Amino acid sequence: MLPGWDVSHEDDIQIERISGALTNCVFFVTKKKKFHDHKKPLRVLLRVYGHGVDQLCDRQKELNFLEMLSALKIGPKLLGIFKNGRFEQHLESKSLNSNDLRDPSTSRHIAQRLSQLHNIVNIFPPPQENIKPEVWVNIDKWYPLALNTIFS
């Protein structure tokens, strides 16, 4: 499924769970051995879908959207999709703090990327049929679930 990932032994990879995902279990999967064409070990993101989450989101629509973002180089490349999850390109990143956000060049870069994201409708126009906005589709799906939820 992943080119260059011919792993012969389980010790050849390292799996590290990442926190913060709302509906999935997310892991960094790192191939420990370095090769001459890579300066760093290969690393991908593994996303395993949570049980019963299909009631909250439409995975096929999510994948279609991610493929569009990937094509525009706004999001990570989808490397492999399987029944209950996917592999994505690992993008080096860091969490920004309030001082980072006050930096004009950082804020400008964020604004440019958000503009690209919001212009996706100009590049991939929505179908012309009378389609209900996704937010209302989700509310119609989630509202009955919320009514049946018992809070302690």
Image (cartoon, rainbow, N blue to C red):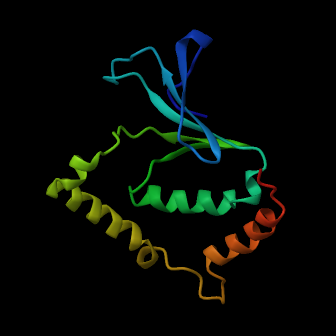
| Extreme residue toward the left, this view | 104
**In this rendering, position of residue 26 left or right of residue 95:** right
Above or below — where is 83 with respect to 130? above
Residue 96 in which image quadrant: top left
Above or below — where is 119 with respect to 6? below
Q: In the image, residue 145 lies at what x, y percent? A: 79, 63
Where's the N terminus, which quadrant? top right
Q: In the image, residue 82 lies at what x, y percent? A: 69, 42
Q: Residue at x 61, y 13 (%)?
A: 10
**In this rendering, position of residue 101 left or right of residue 140:** left
Q: In the image, residue 81 lies at what x, y percent? A: 64, 44
Residue 92 in which image quadrant: top left
Q: Residue at x 61, y 80 (%)?
A: 133
Above or below — where is 10 with respect to 92? above
**In this rendering, position of residue 77 left or right of residue 82:** left
Q: Nearer the viewer, residue 34 or 55?
A: 55
Q: Residue at x 80, y 58 (%)?
A: 149
